[in-house]
Image (cartoon, rainbow, N blue to C red):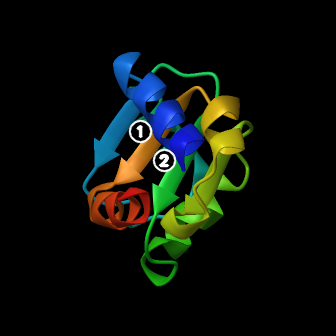
Amino acid sequence: MLALKCALSDKMNKDNIIFVDSLEIKSHKTKKLSETLGNFSFDSALFIHGDEKRIINFKRASSNIPKLAILLDKGLNVKDLITFEKIFIEKNSVQQISKRLA
């Protein structure tokens, strides 16, 4: 757990964690998602979420974008935090992650 806390702390200190309200999107089109993500500058990104059912369109749209991964908050690990440049975390996942690290 200490390694996970350190990795999260390092990302936070470097401003590489971005909190989002939700990963729920209306369209499953990759082009629309790419345009939205173009507002953020990153080479690779990890999206952490808490509910599989709400992000079906996000999963479909992101499947064709290289260096982008999606992970349940329960599966958060040090390797992924180190591998990806930016970490996007759904706000409802923050509480679950905090419980896990307590």
For the point 65% across and 31% down, which residue is it? 82
For the point 41% across and 16% down, which residue is it? 14
Q: Is 4 in front, or is 17?
A: 4
Occupied quadrant, residue 31: top right
Q: Is 3 in front, or is 18?
A: 3
Percent position (x, y) of residue 16?
43, 25
Res 77 visible: yes
Q: Which residue is mark 1?
A: 36
Q: Is residue 53 above or below residue 5?
A: below
For the point 54% across and 22% down, which residue is it? 42
Q: Secondary structure at mark 1?
A: helix
Q: Which residue is mark 2?
A: 32
Q: Secondary structure at mark 2?
A: helix
Horizontal relation, residue 91 to residue 52: left or right: left
Res 25 visible: no
- State how far apart marks 1 and 2 are (Cα): 6 Å
Q: Look at the numbered discs 1 and 2 and tell me whether their residues touch, using CB distance below 8 Å.
A: yes
* Three-letter amino acid code of the residue under disc 1: Thr
Q: Is 18 in front, or is 54?
A: 18
For the point 54% across and 69% down, which residue is it? 74
Occupied quadrant, residue 22: bottom left
Closer to us: mark 1 or mark 2? 1
* Three-letter amino acid code of the residue under disc 2: Lys
